[in-house]
Image: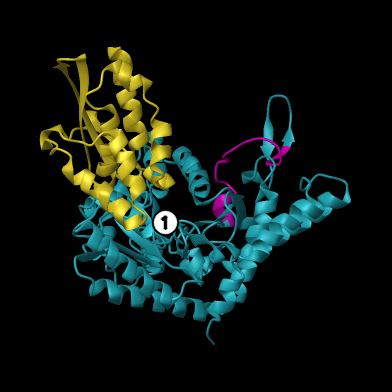
Chain colours: A cyan, B yellow
Amino acid sequence: MSLDVAAIREQFPILKREIDGNPLVYLDNAATTQKPQCVIDALVNYYTTCNSNVHRGAHRLADEATRHFEAARDIVKDFINAPKREEVIWTSGTTEGINIVANGLGQLLSPGDEVIATGMDHHANLVTWQQACKASGAILKTVPVLDSGELDQAAYEALLNERTKFVAFPHVSNALGSVNPIKEMTAKAKQFNAWVLVDGAQGAAHGHVDVQAIGCDFYAFSGHKIYGPMGVGVLWGKESVLADWPVWRTGGEMISTVTLQDASWNVLPYRFEAGTPNVGDAIAMGEAIRWFSALDQDAVVAHEKALLDHATELAENFEGLTIIGQAKEKKGVLSFVLDHGHPADIGFLLDRQGFAVRTGDHCAQPLMARFNVPGTARISFSVYNTLEEVDALFVALKKVRTMLA
Amino acid sequence: MSLPSTEEIVDDLLFFDDWEDKYKYIIDLGKSLPVFDDAWRTPERLVKGCQSNVWIQPGSEQDDAKGEVLTFAVDSDAIIVRGLLGLVLAALNHKTPEEILAFDMTQYFESLDLERHLSPTRGNGLRSIVGRIQNIAQSAA
């Protein structure tokens, strides 16, 4: 089975936009994907038919909103193959999910404990652990990145020891597209009984996430990178770990009983969902995942691989272009620099021709320093991109090179 | 330094029908800026943008007609940003603090009719540079 990409494109109203008279070619999907009409409709429907606060109102709207909100949680649970719906925590996005874990970790670590992150982490999956270590006196170690853009697995193994309490790494590098061997890395950490968090921001949108198969304790991802709205995301955590993990924000909803001097906490998932949740966006994220899951997942993977392979081939034959990150297994992302022209210049001149790409350090400054580049230009694919768009990009890039020569 | 005047720049840029000519003009302006001394690429002189870096080295000199004027050497690692800095310097370099503070940068960039991301924004670091020049002028006024 294959994807009907033309039919998929029809569902994304923004793809009909023009930029300065050129058709929009949206290749910044690792930053955020566009939204299909059904997701936009889900958001509008929520506010036009059943907007109300969940879990508390004794009226029809509250009942309907609660049912839709909790149904969205079930959709997420099935999508990542979580054992229990109570393990699915709504967050504002990957960053908040990681912060919830880091906040608890900071309280659980002791001086001398060790935490392992990587040299390819997004700042959200690095600065958080730096802070947790600073707060607790623990030591942060990082797995180096090889020239290929892969994590140095031998160095990783050498870092693991009895003092290792926590390990975090990205499913897919946002800056390079490298797919990490997350099952193997998790298994190695588990030999030392360390907790494992996988930053799934770039992993979830490309299909086949199974948290039970990975074996990790936490998996965090964002709605807006998987065809859903901004401002909502999911932290999945093992019930046995989350049940005792220190609470993050305190307030309404997350409590069980409250006296003037003390409080006890609610059960999962609510003990991590203080205050009124982002109901409308959660429902729309559920719709986005329902929409995405309905696509043939093998065909999605094959289509995105075809796009990346084609772009890589054109890039390899493009004079003066250097690909940054040549991992054997990559997903969704091609990062590059040109001999002449700073990434920002490339971005300006591609934008003027209708191409949306990301330029800069990709919130991964240590990784840019590792490759000794000020930043890169990054094209990132989604299910609605076409091979013709990739061809057109490299024609536009030729013009960029001529103008910057 | 032989930068064109702001009036000449406005005339030149409005003359071009083709976007490529406009961008090439800005790129050439960037190339025509004096070489920035590598030793000046220090953190104190750095204004970090989201996508590119900008450096600025302020100075002053005596002008026969105007008295003390402020001078600025600038640089960016992105050539188009260097060109945009040229647009800013055409307006603010070798001017008295009073002239700098009286200059309407927003109106100037509007009259250049450039795309929004070629105007002073946080992303390209231009807004911070204009702010820094204005602060220096404020202290000197």
SS state under label 1: loop
Residue name at image x 25 percent, y 52 percent: A342
Q: Quadrant of the N terminus of chain B?
A: top left
Up the image or down, B72 lies above or below A60; here it is above
Quadrant including the C terminus of chain B: top left
The structure residue drawn at horizontal position 44% and vertical position 56%, both measured from the top left corner, is A196
Identified by mark 1, the residue type is Asn
Q: Nearer the viewer, residue A287 or A58?
A: A287
Is A210 situated left or right of A253 in this image?
A: left
**Which contiguous range is marked in magenta?**
A239-256
In the figure, is residue A316 to the left or right of B61?
Answer: right
- Number of residues whose C-alpha sits closer than 10 Å to that of mark 1, classed few (under 14), some (14–19) or many (20 or more): some
Along the viewing direction, whichever of B95 and B51 lies nearer the viewer? B95
Q: Is residue A33 visible?
A: no
Q: Is residue A252 above or below residue A319?
A: above
Residue shown at 49%/44% (left/top)? A99
Residue at 30% of width from left, 52% of height from top? B23
Could you say which quadrant of the image residue B3 lies in? Answer: top left
Q: Which corner quadrant of the image does residue A320 belong to?
A: bottom left
Judge whether residue A334 is colored magenta.
Answer: no
Look at the image and say whether residue A249 sits in the magenta stretch. yes
> Looking at the picture, how far across and down is residue B63, in whole percent?
16, 17
Residue A376 position within the rendered picture, expressed as x and y whole percent measured from the top left? 29, 56
Count of labels in the image: 1
Residue situated in front as seen by the camera: A400 or A324: A400
Dot 1 corresponds to which residue? A193
Chain ID at mark 1: A
